[in-house]
Amino acid sequence: MNKKKHKQLENTLIISETSLREFTEQVFLTIGCTAAHAKLAADVLIAADLRGIDSHGTARLSGYVRLSQKGRLNPSPEIRIVHETPTTATVDGDRGLGLVVAPYAMEIAIKKAKDYGSGWVAVRNSNHFGIAGYHALLAVKQDMIGYAMTNASPLVTPTFSKERMLGTNPMCYAFPAGAYPPVVIDMATSAAANGKLEIAQRNGYSIPDGWVQTKDGTPSVNPHELKSGGALLPLGGDRAHGSHKGFGLSATVDILSAVLSGANYGPWAPPFVAYLEPHPQPVGEGLGHFLGALRADGFRPLDDFKQHMDNWIHRFKNAEPIDKNQPVIIPGEPERAASIERKANGIPVVKSVFDDLLKLANDLSLPSPNIA
């Protein structure tokens, strides 16, 4: 393991993208992934770190390793189509990395969209797939509209309940544009992603009201609340602020990702953390995803669509702000800005996460990542 001094700023280390990427690939190779799968899985995690979605980047790396060591993740899966029509398919991920299974499914959706105008793929028997935006943007690269969603570990309570029944169940919609970057709407359907609680825990912060409740159903600002039996809240927080809408969005993701594919849904979805065992009576196989690709030129000429996407973006960017110092932000802009900055200056990694990577390097007898 390298013993170099690492640059530290306010409890954060700056790591070069190249070093972090190489280390991540080596970790996946060490647990038995093929070279191609290791490269792809690392790319998904590094994309999250570059885009500023730190909760879903290399901070998750040790979690995948522990799942593999526990025998709940297959590092060399035989991913296959088990049901198919000209425009739809169901894929069995063979307990593989969702980081690999989801792009495989999206490529099927893109191929079907090229042939028939749209393609839709449901996935079962998979695992955590990283950021939804990575997969949706694969379609955007082909001048298509991309959709990506997944169900997740049950940590979220439905409106009016105190029982954990749903995951944070993210969904992403990505739209290509012309002169402007794509519009990327990538969000959890809970009030906050669990990763944001983990970030608050690492930094010793309290969390905003409306993110979680105690095991008895009362509001809490304690980022450790889930460890005491509490639950995340749906988007909206409570009924008065529209949590029924967040519940409805999360239910949509759960049904499309898991009920449709044959994966585990609702409270039966397997936990990401290896120290918790899956439900003893599963209703399906693994986690589920839902991917889609839609040709814009199936509705109007592509150049016309892109021109009007640019016009849409321009008009919204120039909407009159409440505060002239805070203009309207187009979905996807903060992530793109973060990616540009981090590619130039390195990826900031919280020290506790870096310590976890150092331990992983030591356990697997790998060189640790270097500073930028």
Image (cartoon, helix red, strand yellow):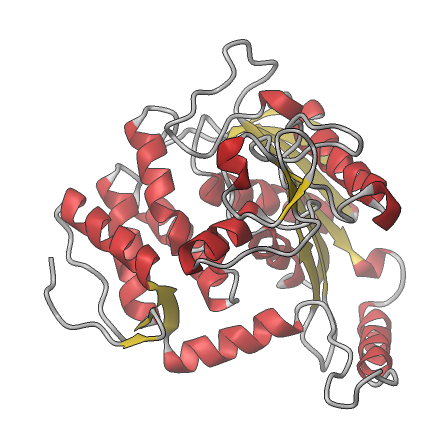
Q: Nearer the viewer, residue 158 or 138?
A: 158
Viewer can see residue 166:
yes
x and y, in percent, of residue 371 in the image: 25, 73
Which residue: 85% across, 80% down? Answer: 311
Decide: is 93 above or below 177: above
On the rendered image, what quadrant is the N terminus found in?
Answer: bottom left
Which residue: 25% across, 76% down? Answer: 7
Which residue: 47% across, 68% down? Answer: 50
In the displayed structure image, the side of residue 70 where residue 271 appears, left or right: right
Viewer can see residue 86:
no
x and y, in percent, of residue 289 in the image: 62, 36
Question: Hey, which quadrant is residue 254 in on the image?
Answer: top right
Question: Hey, which quadrant is residue 296 in on the image?
Answer: bottom right
Question: Hey, which quadrant is residue 268 in on the image?
Answer: top right
Decide: is 181 above or below 97: below
In the displayed structure image, the side of residue 79 where residue 141 appears, left or right: right
